[in-house]
Image (cartoon, helix red, strand yellow):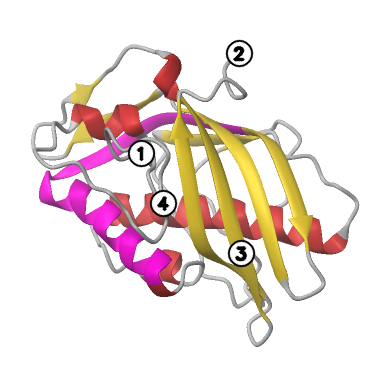
Amino acid sequence: MNRRPVLLTALALTAPLVLAACGSEDTDVPTKGSDKATGSTVPTPTASAPAADPRPAIELPGDLSYTFDWPKTGDREKDAVLADSEQSIKAVDQAIVNQNALDKAYLHYYEGEAAAETQKFVQNYVDHKAGITGSYRFYAPEVSVEKDGTASLSYCEDQGRAFVKYLETGEIKKTEVTAKSYVIYHTSLKRDEDRGVWVIQKIVSQSGSEKCRP
C-alpha cells in the first residue's frame, strides 16, 4: 500500500518501504470514505457518522481539508463502498495526526495483511515525528460490486497541496508539484456482514499515473 510518495520523500526515509500485502507498481518510494461527494470540500474536524452508527468517529485538525469528487452512483452497495472508502482514507490520516500506528479507527476499515502494512506506513510518520497538513483531492472513482460480497474501487489522488509537517519544530516541508503528485489507487474490499462495513483487503498504487494527471 504505497501512499503519498511526494510526502514521504520529504521525510527522507533511509529505507524505502515495500508493502507486500498492498502491493505497488512504484517501488521507488512509499506513497499514501461519507457519501457527501460531488466535489464538496470537507472541512475538519469531522465525524464519520451519526451516533447510532457503529463506525468510529474521526476527528481531524483544521489545517487538513478534503475534496471527494465522488458523486453518488444511485446503486446502494456501490455508494456504500465509496462512503466507507472515504472514511478509511480519513481514518489513516487520523492515525498519523494522533501519532498512533494502532489507531482503532483505521483498524475498523482494514484487516489482515492490509492492516499490518498500514501500521508500518503510519509508523514511518511516528518515527520521524512528522504529521501532515494541507488539502487533499480524490477523484475519478470507478467502483464495482460482485455478488459474492467483494468489491473493487479505483480512484485518483492529487497530492500537490499536501505537505509533511514536523511536529517538534512546526516546519512544513513543501514540495514541488510534479507528475508523481498524481497517484492512482486500486483497492479490493470485502463486506463484513456482521458490522455492515466494506473492509479493505488490498491496495495497489502507482504515482505519476497518466490517468490522474490534469
Q: Quadrant of residue 78?
A: bottom right
Question: Which of pointers 2 and 3 lies earlier in the amino acid sequence?
Answer: 3
Find out whether the residues at labels 1 and 3 contact each other: C-beta distance under 8 Å: no
- Residue under numbered circle 1: 31
Which amino acid lies under the numbered mark 3 shown in the image of this protein?
Leu
- Residue under numbered circle 3: 189
Task: Point out the stretch of residues depicted in magenta.
Answer: 113-138
Q: Residue at left 40%, top 13%?
A: 178
Q: Mark 4 Cα within 10 Å, few/some/many (few <14, many 20+)?
A: some
Q: Residue at left 35%, top 39%?
A: 31
- Residue under numbered circle 2: 214
- Disc 2 to disc 4, C-alpha distance: 25 Å
Decide whether residue 117 is among the magenta residues: yes
Whole-percent x, y for residue 139 in the image: 65, 32
- Disc 3 to disc 4, C-alpha distance: 14 Å
- Residue under numbered circle 4: 23
- Disc 2 to disc 3, C-alpha distance: 28 Å
Q: Nearer the viewer, residue 54 or 142?
A: 142
Q: Could one spot residue 117 in this view of the protein?
A: yes
Whole-percent x, y for residue 192 in the image: 63, 79
